[in-house]
Amino acid sequence: MSDTHAESIPFVRETTLPQAAPPTAERGVYKWGRENLFATPANALLTLVSIYVIYVVLSAILPWVLNGVWNAGSLSECREILAGTRGGCFAVLVDRWEQLFFGFKYPSDQLWRPTLTLVLFFFAVAPVLFFDLPRKLLAFTAVFPFLAYWLIWGGPILVPIVALVGVGAGYVVYSRLVAQSFAGGFFGGIAAAAVVWFLGGYLVDATTGPSSLLDAVPSRDLGGYMLNFMLGVTCVSLSVPIGIALALGRQSSMPLIKWLSVIFIEFIRGVPLITLLFVASVMLAYFFPPNSTVDLFLRVVIMITMFSSAYIAEVIRGGLAALPKGQYEAADSLGLDYAQSMRLIILPQALKISIPGIVNIAVGLFKDTTLVSVISMFDLVGMIRGPILASTDWNGVYWELLGFAALLFFVVCYGISQYSQWLERRLATDHR
Amino acid sequence: MTTLTDPAKGAFRPSMLLYDTRYRSLTLQAIAAIVLALCLMYLYSNLADNLRAAGLNISFGFLADTAGYDINQTLIDYNSQSSNLRAAVVGILNTLLVAFLACVTATIFGVLAGVLRLSPNWLVRKLMAFYVEIFRNIPVLIWIIIIFTIMTAVLPAPSAFRGDDPDSSMLFNLAAFTNRGIYIPGPYFTRGFGLEGNGGLNWILVIAVLIGSLIGTRAVTASANAKQEATGVRPKTLWINLAIWFVPIIVVLFALGLQWDIPALRGFNFGGGIQIGGPLIALWFALSIYTGAFIAENVRAGILSVSKGQTEAAAALGLRPRRVMSLVVLPQALRVIVPPLISQYLNITKNSSLAIAVGYADITATLGGITLNQTGRAIECVLLLMLFYLIISLLISAFMNVYNNSMKLKER
Amino acid sequence: MTEAVKTPAQMAVSDEVAISIQNMNKWFGSFHVLRDIDLTVNRGERIVICGPSGSGKSTLIRCINALEEHQKGSIEVDGTLLSSDLKNIDKIRSEVGMCFQHFNLFPHLTILENCTLAPIWVRKTPKKEAVETAMHFLEKVKIPDQADKYPGQLSGGQQQRVAIARSLCMRPRIMLFDEPTSALDPEMIKEVLDTMIELAEEGMTMLCVTHEMGFARQVANRVIFMDQGQIVEQNEPEEFFNNPQSPRTQLFLSQILGH
Ligand SMILES: Nc1ncnc2c1ncn2[C@@H]1O[C@H](COP(=O)(O)OP(=O)(O)OP(=O)(O)O)[C@@H](O)[C@H]1O
Ligand SMILES: [Mg+2]
């Protein structure tokens, strides 16, 4: 391995130095070309090779895209229209776009629901991603999960309302009690929420009837790119609080807490996501009470959340470690207790420096949601490899479909990573 | 934060359990332990109930049963009459094989791309940035499937090589790229030991000679260093090192009668030589280019982290560029590059579990796939699978710790 | 000494004991940092601690508000024994203010929020009242107009004055300073020292690790010299500077005053 370095790095050394030459922008295209493309014979060769590579790739892709067929009912129809010329059969995207985005079972007349959810989602994340927006917008972010649940799964509206009221009650109790003691606020809040949910459960049971505005859609009918999106968003949001708890646990001075956190984190990070998905699909059900039916979607969410929370915990641990010791000491010397100093002093700062790292984890996780196709869930990749490529009409349209999937992921992941870089630059110059 | 004075004289009060720093953490841990134990007991009782209801038990006896399925790419002898355990071992070896191959090529791709991203050539820089962004931002599973599709849907079937005027022809008459895999010439021995098997002893001999050469060159370098320290003049070592590397191995290979088995079309398929199956190639290549994009970023960051002042300072001391590189820049850049590189190796190993998506028989596909489905031993199979990956991860991170510690020592 | 000059000793010092440290020892692992420290500080007294680097000055005052634990002996602050009882620790911390060398302001909070945080969460003061108190003390350290800025936007001297105001907002009865001026540029040192002098004149009990000998002469009732974890010498400033007893003190003073 060090051999490769020994050979390649001297090469860098010779060629990086000229890079520091004075700006050449104003000296004309010809000069720029000479200095940036043909400075030395080796360099000129590299340029020619690059141009050749670009030519090969473009000459393969461009005619295929430009000559593509967008209107056909099947691959054979495509071939007829192309009549022997080279071209993609993008008609499959037109024909099957519903399946690609929503899976093959979501009721077609209800597709506005996930679409609306997606639009609302952008409003909900905006205040989280951009600190400059008014903080009041976070109120919508708090309501969004319940709204999204109802829009996507439908069913009686009382369920998300009871859930929301429970959380609201918990929050009110928490904010009343937290000034006295964090533990009191925390457990009081949980207790209040539990009471509301318990009572609300009776209410929901009592009112089962046809009165639901939106038809219920079971989890197994979710699919396509929507499924990737939902898994990514849900699991990342759930795993941030768990990740915080794990990171604090790993820093704890209590050996039991510390070692539990370490074992959990290292265990999760040591196994591939696939094995955790196997746990979700074949093993987890054994650990729920007999006769309970926890659907596959929920089991997968549980496992992916565990997975990403371990990685997020490590990012946050880095953020905590980056804070100067003086911050802890100042908080102590003012008489703040552990919960207060974490909540008011340490975590706000540590989380802020961790955001770029968390965003990177989120990108990785979003890409990893494609793995659910291995345990026969029909996400975007699952849809392509399963129902669409297996259909008689479209058997054999690999490139159009795989290229489309790649494009969808690229757009989202590249966008998020650009955001993360922007944020990093901003945090670096932030005076706070 | 906690304060300890001489033993408190006052009597013990229950409130001290929570408000005395000596007991507080014990109390909290005891509560945590109780909660944890309750959770585990709850999960365990559910498990027991569910297993009883399904008439199952936990037992690893199935490992000794006949596997009953075939694996087309194996490193050790295996047939469908072998046990599940042997199938798992085949899977483990296949995992290690693809992980090893992918680590090597990913490093090559990554170092090349990372170095080229710093090239003064604008076009090359942009092209490499394009490579990195494209591969990092598209799921590796999609890459695996794309390359597998190229293998199966684009490459010709073996039958296309048949006839007087075939549609496809072999590369230099040595290698064939078909949708059943790639066939390349395979070496074999005509003399020597253990020819009945696959010449295992001969291979050991070859490896031993190579190790001997390695030790020999090390010794030459050491004696050159010693001479340089003593006299100040560094003797030329290039030719003697080349000789130590090449002469013994050539002699040995010649003595053992090395021959190449060229693949050729036999019946419906190619025979002879070494067959590398399509799934292996898809997985290997996809993991390499995908991880290579990440490694490229690490390499670039590592090289950039060595400030220019360092190079200049070394050059000002009169060191020649080659020595500047090997004595000053490389050690510093490696210190930044190696830790993330090792965690990329770990990622490769874990991502190799995606083999199951293209039917490469790694441990996830054998133990976690076919064996699990045939025996229904879900819990046992998944546990063993996780255990295997955990051990690999622990080994890799132990190695990383050793490396980091040795670096830390040098920092002082 | 004439009537007109107000000597440190004449500023009000009561007989009431504020801090009493007896036979206190502390180890870091096997390293004995503090040895048999005995120190009594009366209410209103102003004490300057000096000594070579590594002598344990910081450790001593950090033990007083339990930022470090001591292993042997006793520390009593305002009649509260510093024991393993969390309530005692909390009580002592809320009565003892501390200023650090590197200010340790909370960078994510505004100056005003820095000052109101502890009163609101520890003292449970209503927010309005906390803001009034904070503005009062910010005026006292002469930076009320910066209340809505963030610490990163202030100069070092201003930050240290905010740190003092932040401690004062808890209405401490004792203030600890750990080299409050040693991270500052010379022109900023004066503004911080002026603030501290003003505080001293109001009768605050102060323990101050500093090498500002002018400050020691002007305000201290007593100067303590520490070396290798021990209190080597303590005396009134005039005596201490003009007539040091121990050779170690003489050496230290010659080094610090010499240049
Ligand atoms: N957390 C710690 N662990 C181990 N040793 C420590 C720790 N903190 C301080 N020490 C050691 O204790 C000794 C006293 O430290 P202290 O900070 O009290 O010195 P100081 O008198 O304040 O010095 P300075 O003038 O440099 O601030 C030093 O030798 C230091 O290395
Ligand atoms: Mg100090």
Image (tube, coloured by chain):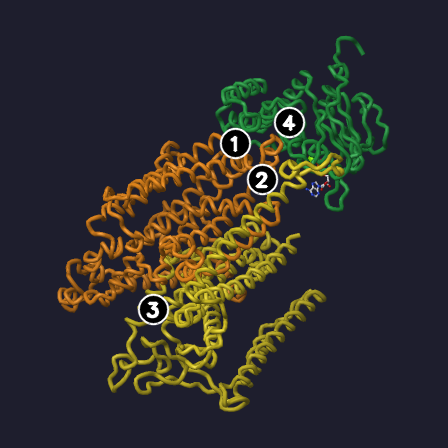
Chain colours: A orange, B yellow, C green
CA distance for labels 4 and 1: 22 Å
- Nearer mark to the viewer, of 4 and 1: 4
Q: Amino acid at mark 4?
A: Gly
Q: Which residue is mark 2?
A: A324
Tell me the SS state at disc 4: strand
Tell me the SS state at disc 2: loop
- Nearer mark to the viewer, of 3 and 4: 4
Provide residue B247's location: percent of width, then percent of height: 56, 82
Quarter of image, res C178: top right
Q: Which residue is mark 4?
A: C97
CA distance for labels 2 and 3: 50 Å
Same subunit, tags 2 and 1: no
CA distance for labels 2 and 4: 20 Å
Q: Which residue is mark 1?
A: C152
Same subunit, tags 2 and 4: no
Q: Amino acid at mark 2?
A: Pro
Answer few, some or many: residues within 10 Å of disc 2's Cα (few below 14, many 20 plus, some between 14 and 19): few
Residues at circles 2 and 3 in contact by the CB criterion of under 8 Å: no
Residue B191 visible within the image: yes
Q: Which residue is mark 3?
A: B148
- Nearer mark to the viewer, of 2 and 1: 2
Answer few, some or many: residues within 10 Å of disc 1's Cα (few below 14, many 20 plus, some between 14 and 19): some
Quarter of image, res A402: bottom left
- Nearer mark to the viewer, of 2 and 4: 4
Residue visible at 39% across and 67% down in the picture? B356
Answer few, some or many: residues within 10 Å of disc 4's Cα (few below 14, many 20 plus, some between 14 and 19): many
The residue marked by circle 1 belongs to what chain?
C
- Nearer mark to the viewer, of 1 and 3: 3
